[in-house]
Image: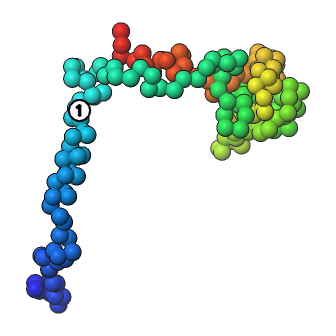
Amino acid sequence: MATEGNYEMAVDLDGGAEEMAIDESVAETQTARLKSGATKKKGRGFASGGGYEREQTDQTGFETLEEDSTGKAQRSVEGWIVIITGVHEEATEEDVQEKCAEYGEIKNLHLNLDRRTGYVKGYALVEYETYKHAKEAIDSLNGTEFMTNTIHADFAFVRGPGGSKSYQQVGRR
């Protein structure tokens, strides 16, 4: 027992030793089994060369999406989101709703406001149920005049250049 100030502290160095007894033969076989299944890899990308090359063990390890009629546009969780930029700072949600409603049913509309000024930040996010409605809105709204400003519309979410194949091509030239 050690004494610190007014407190006594007991340290048990052999506490629970009988509870911790492990059959050593079982432990050795489990360790041997784990070591035989493990492979030793080191470096960036697990290559043995310069460290930047990728090990080419499985070319089909990545899932790919078939190219569909949507081109590079990607669907969000609930629908197709169109971003409209160049929105006039004094526009209201009703103004944007009225402008976009003629192309299809709007599921959701978000118009960000600047905290400091209280005016619109200059963009709106409009969510449509179908790709057809979203594409029609983009084609019709892009480059048009809205409250003295020229607005631009496009899909908010798009696939990167080359889609999923571009990931596989990184570092291989």
Given the image, on which type of amino acid does mark 1 rest?
Lys
Q: Residue at x 85, y 33 (%)?
A: 105
Q: Residue at x 67, y 40 (%)?
A: 114
Residue assigned mark 1 = 41
Left or right of residue 55, residue 153 in this image: right
Relative depth, front residue between 105 and 130 = 130
Q: Please tell me which residue lies in front, 9 or 164.
A: 164
- The chosen color scheme is rainbow
Measuring from the top left, give residue 142's x and y in whole percent.
76, 17
Residue 149 location, x and y as percent? 77, 22
Q: Looking at the image, can residue 91 be seen?
A: no
> Does 172 sit above or below residue 92?
above
Depth check: 6 or 34 in front?
A: 34
Q: Is residue 61 left or right of residue 27?
A: right
Report the residue at 81% width, 20% height from top: 136
Q: Quick one: quadrant of the C terminus? A: top left
**Residue 92's spot in the image, x, y percent?**
81, 37
Check the image and name the residue furthest to the left: 2
| Quarter location, residue 146 | top right
